[in-house]
Amino acid sequence: MGQIILIEGQAGTGKTTRLLAKAKELGPILVQREYQRVLAMSFMHGARRRLVDKFHADCPLLPTHITTIDAFALDIVNRWRLILGFSLPVSIGTSRNSDDSLYSTLFGFSDVLGKAAELLASSSVGRVIGDTFPLVVIDEFQDCDEGHIALIEQLAKYSTLVLAADRFQYLKAEGDSCPALEWIERIAQSHDVAYEVLTTIHRTDQADILQAAANLRSNCQIDGAIQPLICPNAGPAAWKILERLVLGWSGIRWTGSCALLTVKRSDPLLIRTCQSLDKQASDRKYARYFTDRRAGIAWHQEVDESAECEQASSELCVLDHGIAVETLNDLLIESLSPTARQVRDRLLRFAQLKRLSHLPEALATGHIRQAVHSARAFGRQQGKRIITTVHGAKNREFEHVIILWTKSVPPSRDLQRKLLYNAITRAKKDCLLLVIGNDRDVASSPVLKLLGEPLPVFPAR
C-alpha cells in the first residue's frame, strides 16, 4: 500500500490550498515519466472546478488529470468494459424500455463505482492505473460513501494518497459518523497514516461569523455570534434582503457576490420570499435606488439536474414514443435554451448519420442528460447573486450570505447544526440569518439558541 496523508481542518482553514502544496511537493518526485499524471479528484463538480482553477494558478507545469470520483470510475469501466462483458459504451441512466440497449449499457452511479473497484482489484488494471497516476489527491474526502471508498481503497494499493476532509461537514448522517474517516481509522491500525491538522481560519476574519461557526461545532453557546432575525412570514424576510442588497439603510449595502441559501430548493417559503422580493423591488418609492427598476434584483437560481433535463425535453417536444426528425427541424431555434439547441443539433446529426426519420425516447433523453450534465459540470458559475441550497453551496465561498431558515429543516439536531454551520461558513464578509417563524419557534430550537438571543427583523423604536 502506498503512503496516505490526511489533511483535516474546519471550513476556511485552507485544506484545498494545503492539498495543492502537497501535490506540488510530491508531484515532481512521483510523476517522472511523460505519460504520468497527478490524479486530482473531488466528490462534487463545484470542488472539481475549484481544483482546476487552483492547479492552473499554483501548479501550471504539473501534469494533472482533474475529475470527479464518479467520472473517473466511469472512465475506468468504459476503458475496460470488454473485460466486464459489455460491448457497448457504459453510461449513467436507468433502462426503461428495449430501445435503451441499442446505443449504450446503462448503469446507476453505485453500479459503476462497484464495477470500477472490481476492475482495479485486478492486478493488471490496478498496476496500469497506479503507474499512470502515482499520486492521487482527493478534496472533500469526507463526502465519499461506501462505493467511493471501495474504489479509493484499490487506488491506495498502488498510489500515494493525499486526502482533505472535515468530519463536521459530512451532511448525510447524524452525530460524528463519517464512513470515509472511519475507513482511514481502520487503515491506520495496520498502516502508517500521516495526519495534518489545520487550525487557522483564512476565509474570514469577521468575529460574528467565526463565533457562530465555533458555537455550532462545539455545541456550546458563547456570546458574539451572528444573531438570528425573526421574520413572521416571507414579506419581512424579503424586505430585509432588499434592504441589504439595494437600500442600505442599516449599513453599507452589499455589492459583492451573494448567495441566498435554503435547505430545500422546493421550500414554499423560498418561493414566496422571492415573489415578495420582486413585488417590493418594483415599488415606486424605491425607484431611486435602482439604475433600472424594471430589472429588479437579478438572481441566478440553481435547479436540480433532473429539472433541467425535463425542461429541455419539453422544449424539444420529446414524447414517450420519441420524436420525429421533422419535428426537430421545425423547432424555432431562437426559442430554445442553449442546452436544448445543442441537443437538437446533436440529434439531427445522429439521425442524418444513421438515416433515421424517428428517434427513440431513450436516445433523445440520453443526449439531453449528457448535455445538461456537461453544462453543469464544466460550465462556469453564473451570476454574482445566486439562489441555491446549503448542499449546493458546499465547497464554495461568497462575500455575502443570506440564510433562509424555515420549518423545512430536518428534525435532527445534529444535522441542523451541520447544515447551519456549512451555510454560515460560506461567507467571507457578511452573513444574514433569517428565521421565518415566531419567538416561540426560535426559543424551542436548541440549534438556534447556540447563536444567542434572536432579534426581530423590525426592531422596536
Image: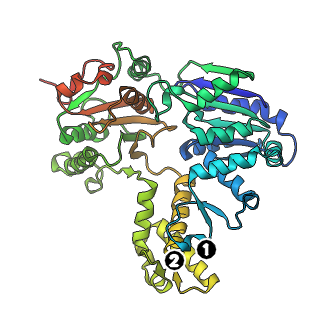
Judge by depth and name the residue closer to the eye, 252 or 358.
358
Which secondary structure, mark 1?
Answer: helix
C-beta proximity under 8 Å, tags 1 and 2: yes
Q: Residue at x 35, y 19 (%)?
A: 225
Disc 1 residue type?
Answer: Leu
Q: Residue at x 59, y 62 (%)?
A: 106
Instruction: In the rendered view, tell whether residue 220 sits above or below residue 346.
Output: above
Residue 270: image quadrant is: top left
Q: Position of residue 65 (x, y in %)?
A: 71, 47
Q: Earlier in the sequence, mark 1 or mark 2?
A: 1
Report which residue position mark 2 lands on: 360
Q: Residues within 10 Å of mark 2 (few under 14, many from 20)?
A: some
Q: Position of residue 24 (x, y in %)?
A: 75, 33
Judge by depth and name the residue closer to the eye, 23 or 173.
173
Report which residue position mark 1 lands on: 102
Disc 2 residue type?
Answer: Pro
Which secondary structure, mark 2?
Answer: loop
Quick check: can you spot residue 55? no
Q: Nearer the viewer, mark 1 or mark 2?
A: 1
